[in-house]
Image (cartoon, rainbow, N blue to C red):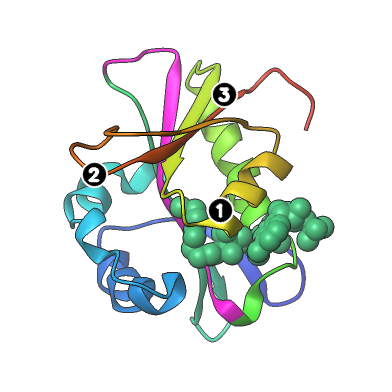
């Protein structure tokens, strides 16, 4: 990355820094959707963006699906409000695409809440096909918008 901002592989201990900011960064309570198990078990496919002072600028939590051998999945990605619209989420996604491709994956999937217009616009800009909202996707009264992107398509 440029200047004093860089990306690195996540570590399990990053969980505490991430969970401390997610409700603020999302502007609503979302921490229930990111239990510690994601950093304990998927830190090596997750990515941290930080400033030289150690300040968290963004993160991506994702994994290569154990069951869907063609697919990698992004559970959470966020960028600090003061760092937005500078291409940081794009860089985090591109880094994850490289991790997924190296593991032989051809598809990346994610979902978001229908109210999250920024997430839908971002995924569309990143070349994801957008489906939904799909009613009941995560159970009664819990619709989700689904994203899917082939890794062999141009950026
Ligand atoms: C969604 C989010 C991750 C985008 O991060 P970002 O670093 O600002 O995104 P980028 O700068 O890489 O944007 C790349 C492109 O996506 C699109 N985009 C990003 N944010 C957008 C927004 N709020 N509205 C419309 N388009 C947007 C644009 O096309 C943008 O390119 P441009 O700036 O040249 O126009 C960030 O807004 C965020 O952290 N939101 C809260 C958490 C969240 O909802 N995460 C969703 C994923 S789980």
Residue 100 drawn above or below residue 10: above
Residue at 18%, 57% in the rendered image: 36
Q: Is residue 72 visible?
A: yes
Provide residue 91's location: percent of width, then percent of height: 67, 52
- Is tag 1's residue or tag 2's residue first in the polypeptide sequence? 1
* Quadrant in which ligand 1 is drawn: bottom right
* Residue behind mark 1: 119
> Is label 1 in a helix, a strand or a loop?
helix
Q: How far apart are marks 1 and 2 (CA)?
A: 20 Å
Dot 2 surroundings within 10 Å: few (below 14), some, or many (20 or more)?
few
- Tell me which segment is drawn in magenta: 67-81
Between 92 and 27, the residue placed more toward the observer is 27
Q: Residue furthest bottom?
A: 53
Q: Which quadrant, please, contains the C terminus?
A: top right
Residue at 50%, 82% in the rendered image: 55
* Residue behind mark 2: 141
> Is label 2 in a helix, a strand or a loop?
loop
Q: In which quarter of the image is residue 89?
A: bottom right
Q: Is residue 60 visible?
A: no
Between 18 and 128, the residue placed more toward the observer is 128
Q: How far apart are marks 1 and 3 (CA)?
A: 23 Å
* Residue behind mark 3: 101
Between 117 and 62, the residue placed more toward the observer is 117
Report the mark closest to the observer, 1 or 2.
2
Residue at 47%, 56% in the rendered image: 115
């Amino acid at each position: 990355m440029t200047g004093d901002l860089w990306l690195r592989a996540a570590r399990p201990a990053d969980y505490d820094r991430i969970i401390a900011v997610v409700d603020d960064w999302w502007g609503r309570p979302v921490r229930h959707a990111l239990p510690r198990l994601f950093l304990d078990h998927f830190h090596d496919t997750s990515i941290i963006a930080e400033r030289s002072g150690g300040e968290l600028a963004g993160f991506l939590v994702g994994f290569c699906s154990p069951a869907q051998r063609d697919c990698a999945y992004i559970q959470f990605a966020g960028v600090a409000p003061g760092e937005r619209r500078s291409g940081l989420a794009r860089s985090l996604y591109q880094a994850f695409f490289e991790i997924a491709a190296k593991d032989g994956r051809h598809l990346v999937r994610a979902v978001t809440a229908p109210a999250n217009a920024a997430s839908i616009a971002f995924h569309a800009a990143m070349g994801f096909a957008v489906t939904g909202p799909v009613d009941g996707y995560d159970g009664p009264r819990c619709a989700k918008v689904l994203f899917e992107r082939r890794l062999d398509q141009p950026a």
